[in-house]
Image (spheres, rainbow, N blue to C red):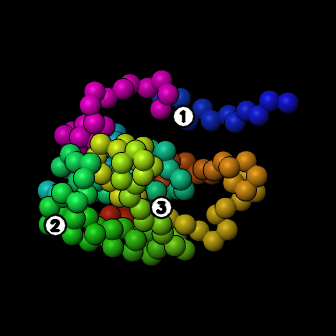
Amino acid sequence: MEDILYAPWRTEYIAGEKVEGCVFCHISAHADKDSEFHILHRDEFCFVVMNKYPYTPGHFMIIPHLHTDKLEELESETWLHMAALAQKGVRLLKEGFGAHGVNIGMNLGAAGGAGIAEHIHMHLVPRFNRDTNFITSIADTRVYSTDFEKIYKKIKSLIPKYF
C-alpha cells in the first residue's frame, strides 16, 4: 500500500509564480497588494503577514522591512518594535481568536531551521488544547481543518482593536 497525502491547496506553492529575490522584500515593497499577500498590519518598521503554509489556523509572522539574516545586527529600535508587535499579536490570538496558548519563535539561518533564511522573521503560532491529534501522532502530519481566507478575514477584523 502506498502512503499518499492529498493536499491540493499546496499546488500553488509547488507550481505557482516564483518571486525573483527575497519573497519578504517583495511583499514589503508591494503595499498595493496587501490583501493578496494577506498582510494584517504594516508600519514603518515591520509588516505582519499570515503564514501561507501555517502550522495551525491563525499562524502569522512579524517581519522587518529591512532585509537581513542577522538578528544580532538589527537596530534595537526595530527589534523592540517587533517585540511590541509580538505582545499585541499574542493578546489578539488569545483574547480575540480564542487561542489557549501561543508559540513564538525565530529560526535563524538554514542550520537553525529557517525556510527563508535570508530575511529574519518571527512566528506567532496559536495553540489550542488538544490540537495535536492522532494524525500528528501517527503520521507526523498536520491537518489544517478550516478555510485560510476565513481565518485571515477574522484576524484582520481584530487588528484595529489589538494593534
Mark 2 near mark 3, Cβ–Cβ under 8 Å? no
Q: Residue 161, relative to residue 115: is it above or below?
A: below
Q: Mark 3 or mark 2, which is nearer the start of the sequence?
A: 2
- Image quarter for residue 107? bottom left
Nearer to us in this view, 127 or 109: 109
Mark 3 near mark 1, Cβ–Cβ under 8 Å? no
Q: Amino acid at mark 2?
A: Ser
Q: Is residue 139 magenta?
A: no
Quickly name the residue at label 3: 125
Q: Please tell me which residue is depicted at 54% across the width and 56% down the height of the picture.
A: 56
- Left or right of 96 on screen, residue 68: left
Alpha-carbon span between mark 3 and mark 1? 19 Å
Q: Amino acid at mark 3?
A: Val
Residue 105 visible in the snapshot: yes
Magenta residues, start to end: 13-34
- Residue at the limit of the structure toward the right, as seen here: 1
Count residues near mark 1 (Cα–Cα under 10 Å), then give few for <14, some for 14-19, many for 20+: few
- Image quarter for residue 137? bottom right
Q: Please tell me which residue is depicted at 39% across the width and 74% down the height of the picture.
A: 91
Circle 3: element type = strand
Residue 17's spot in the image, x, y percent? 38, 25
Q: Please tell me which residue is depicted at 16% across the width and 66% down the height of the picture.
A: 76
Count residues near mark 2 (Cα–Cα under 10 Å), then give few for <14, some for 14-19, many for 20+: few
Q: Please tell me which residue is depicted at 28% across the width and 27% down the height of the picture.
A: 20
Main SS type for the magenta part?
helix
Circle 1: element type = helix
Quickly name the residue at label 1: 10
- Residue at the limit of the structure toward the front, as seen here: 111
Alpha-carbon span between mark 2 and mark 3? 24 Å
Q: Amino acid at mark 1?
A: Arg
Quickly name the residue at label 2: 76
Alpha-carbon span between mark 1 and mark 2? 37 Å
